[in-house]
Image (cartoon, rainbow, N blue to C red):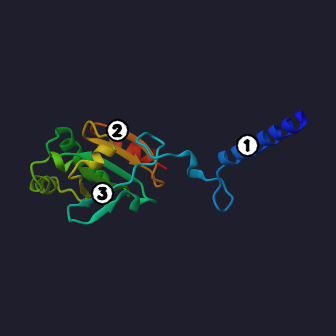
Amino acid sequence: MKKTVILIVLIGMFGWAIYDHQSDNRTSPTGLEDETSEESIGLEEGDIAPDFELQNMSGERVQLSDYRGERVMLNFWATWCPPCRAEMPDMEEFHNHTDIVILAVNLTETESNIQQIEDFVEAFDLTFPILLDEEAEVASTYAIQPVPTTFMIDSNGIINDKSLGPLNYEMMVQEYEDMH
């Protein structure tokens, strides 16, 4: 009787070891290891940037995941923010001299009105997409404090850099060159 109990326990332990090993080596339907199993959605370097959808100034819906396969500079800003105002000319120059997608998320909830944003965009002659975070949902998801805050996201949707405060043109170029 003791031998039977010991045998059942050993078989159970062996079965558990196989199960545990299989769950650690997640595989895709092709039998290859799933490369995204170690990556997680988050806000730190190496994390997958959280997806979101916002309207641009023309009323079109824009989703971050639409830009997979391209490098993205995700910038959070407001018209009343002096450092944001200071970095906008450099962002426009950076936009004109690289193939990076710039998504400039305006903290619309903190603005007086939409006209203020339109006047700002016109005054700085900005040509990259301005997204309107009217209820601060995306700013909350990205835990934005302070503005400006910028995330450099590689073509796989992975955050390569997170910068708090304004960037100048040289810093933008350096971050761009460091991206995959």
Dot 3 falls on a residue whose secondary structure is helix
The circle on residue 163 is: 2
- Count neighbours of disc 1 (C-alpha within 10 A) and say few if under 14, some if 14 to 19, many if 20 or more: few
Label 2: which secondary element: strand
Mark sitting earlier along the chain (2/3): 3
Res 148 quadrant in image = top left
Closest to the observer: 23 or 112?
23
Mark 1: which amino acid? Trp
Residue in view at x 31 percent, y 51 percent: 94
User: Residue 119: percent from the left, percent from the top?
Assistant: 10, 55
Q: What residue appears at the point 49 percent right and 50 percent down from the top-left corner?
A: 180
Q: Quadrant of residue 65?
A: bottom left
Q: In the picture provided, is 125 more to the left or to the right than 93?
A: left
- Residue visible at 17% across and 56% down? 125
Residue carrying label 1: 16
Question: Residue 124 in the image: x percent, y percent?
Answer: 16, 52
Q: CA distance from mark 2 to mark 3?
A: 21 Å
The part of the image, by quadrant, that contains residue 100 is: bottom left
